[in-house]
Every structure is written in structure tokens, then in C-alpha cells.
């Protein structure tokens, strides 16, 4: 069963912001099917994308890529998250899943597997003969501008996981963005139910806890101070803080 007009849709996100959760929600829409993971290097392969496929990934922003996606008529759903929680989640992900990341070898060999020290280097980066890493802010920053691009649906990860009502509201935003008034309220409510039913967090290979606010207990004062310098204004702009006094 297809609903509304056929769409070309892409899920884009900052890493560790609920990419797989968003994919599951969107794939609950009848007629959509999975496609390949996309990144900045292979984005040109979307030339052959068919309507109702769903590529997903972490694509850096550039004006050329933006124009390319517009030309193809691809609607983008962009997911972002409190960057402080991204830091914590990324550190755990490196330890538990991403052993190819340069920081994993550094953590295993030079940090004596101390998680607190790994988090410090996730934040500040490393310049070592055996490891060069700019820090997670520099690594992910090129993705951030998508949030401000007109015509893209930007959703907060926290609104997907806070509670059922918040997730329902996010699903409605997705359907309104993709289909507008081309489907009636009864169909829309049915599809929202299907989207909610399609979420199976345990089937996501990268899922750990998905908690909100872990940074408050996992980051030490020094790490928080460094992050405040890096992303203080960003957190205010994204609505996570009213000012930089946190």
C-alpha cells in the first residue's frame, strides 16, 4: 500500500542522534523500503534513487550537495541531539562497536582503558605519533549546518524518545512534511500507529541506552568547561540551554 504522492526521502543525522530509530519510524510508512547507507563520498549514487527508497547516513553540508539533493527532489529529514550526550554516546560506541576508530587503539594501548580519559580525548582530540584525531566537534561539525537549511525537516532526538506523546507528535510532523494535505486525518492517524509499531530498538546494532542527559553524570567539570567553549553558543541556538551558565 502506498500513501499520498511517491516521495524521494533521505534520513540524515549527526552520528549518535538516533539514526536507526528515525529509519525505523519512517519505514513504518507503507510502501517505503530501505536503501543503502550514504555519506559525503558516495552521495552522487543517489542519481539512481527510486521513489519510496530510503537512503540514510551522515552527510556533511555543502552548497553543492544541497543543490544536488534539491535537483533530485529529495526530501531530507535531519536528526540532531544535545552535543554533550553525543560525546558520551560516541565514547561508548568507540569502545563497544567502533574498534576501527583511531581512538580505540589509543584507548586500549595508551590510556589503560580508562573511560574518563577516552572522553577527554573524544572532546579535545589527540596529537600523538600513534594517533591523530581532531576531536568529535571538529569531526561532526560539517554536518551541523543542515539544521538551518530551509525546506528540510529538522527533528530533535530527544523528541523521539522523551515519551509516547512526544514521539507521536514527531511522527505527525514527518507525515505533514512529506505528504501535507494529500492524506486525510484517518489515514494519517493509522500511519502514525504503524510508524510507532515499527520501532524495535533491540534490533539496532548501534543502540546502547539512548538516555537523555547522561552527560550530567558522565562528564567531569573540566570536560564540561571545554565543551562549553566549543559548543556553548550552539547549545543555545539549538534550544538546549537558555545561556552558557550550565
Image: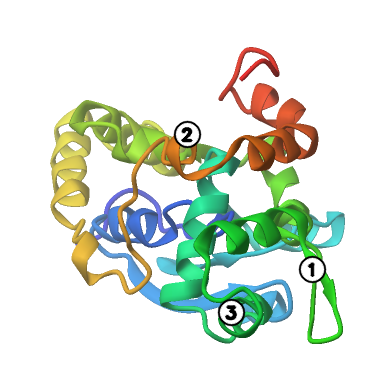
Helix, strand or loop at disc 2? helix
Q: Earlier in the sequence, mark 2 or mark 1?
A: 1
Image spot of residue 194 (x, y percent):
15, 50
Helix, strand or loop at disc 3? helix
Residue with the mark numbered 3: 104
Between 175 and 208, which is closer to the camera in this rendering?
208
Image spot of residue 161 (x, y percent):
30, 40
Distance (Cα) linking label 3 and label 2? 24 Å
Residue 182: in sight, yes or no? no
Residue at the (13%, 41%) spot, across then down: 190
Residue at the (75%, 52%) spot, across then down: 141
Task: Quadrant for residue 83, please give it.
Answer: top right
Q: Is residue 201 left or right of residue 79?
A: left
Between 160 and 89, which is closer to the camera in this rendering?
89
Residue with the mark numbered 1: 126
Colouring of the image:
rainbow
Residue furthest out toward the front: 112
Amino acid at each position: 500500500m502506498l500513501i499520498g504522492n511517491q516521495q524521494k526521502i533521505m534520513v540524515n543525522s549527526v552520528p549518535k542522534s538516533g539514526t536507526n530509530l528515525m529509519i525505523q519510524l519512517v519505514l513504518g510508512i507503507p510502501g517505503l523500503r530501505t536503501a543503502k547507507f550514504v555519506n559525503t563520498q558516495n552521495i552522487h549514487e543517489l542519481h539512481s534513487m527510486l521513489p519510496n527508497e530510503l537512503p540514510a547516513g551522515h552527510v556533511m553540508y555543502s552548497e553543492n550537495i544541497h543543490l544536488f539533493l534539491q535537483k533530485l527532489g529529495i526530501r531530507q529529514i535531519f536528526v540532531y541531539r544535545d552535543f554533550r550526550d553525543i560525546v558520551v554516546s560516541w565514547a561508548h560506541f568507540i569502545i563497544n562497536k567502533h574498534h576501527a576508530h583511531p581512538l580505540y587503539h589509543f584507548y586500549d594501548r595508551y590510556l589503560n582503558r580508562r573511560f574518563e580519559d577516552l572522553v577527554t580525548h573524544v572532546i579535545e582530540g589527540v596529537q600523538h605519533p600513534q594517533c591523530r584525531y581532531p576531536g568529535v566537534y571538529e569531526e561532526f561539525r560539517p554536518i551541523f549546518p543542515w539544521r538551518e537549511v530551509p525546506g528540510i525537516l529538522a527533528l530533535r532526538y530527544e523528541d523521539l524518545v522523551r515519551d509516547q506523546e512526544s514521539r507521536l507528535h514527531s511522527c505527525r510532523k514527518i507525515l505533514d512534511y512529506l505528504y501535507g494535505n494529500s492524506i486525510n486525518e484517518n489515514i494519517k492517524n493509522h500511519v502514525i500507529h504503524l510508524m510507532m509499531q515499527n520501532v524495535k530498538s533491540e534490533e539496532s546494532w548501534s543502540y546502547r541506552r539512548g538516555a537523555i542527559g547522561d552527560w550530567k553524570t558522565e562528564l567531569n567539570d573540566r570536560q564540561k568547561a571545554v565543551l562549553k567553549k566549543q559548543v556553548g553558543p550552539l547549545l543555545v541556538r539549538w534550544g538546549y540551554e537558555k545561556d552558557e551558565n550550565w
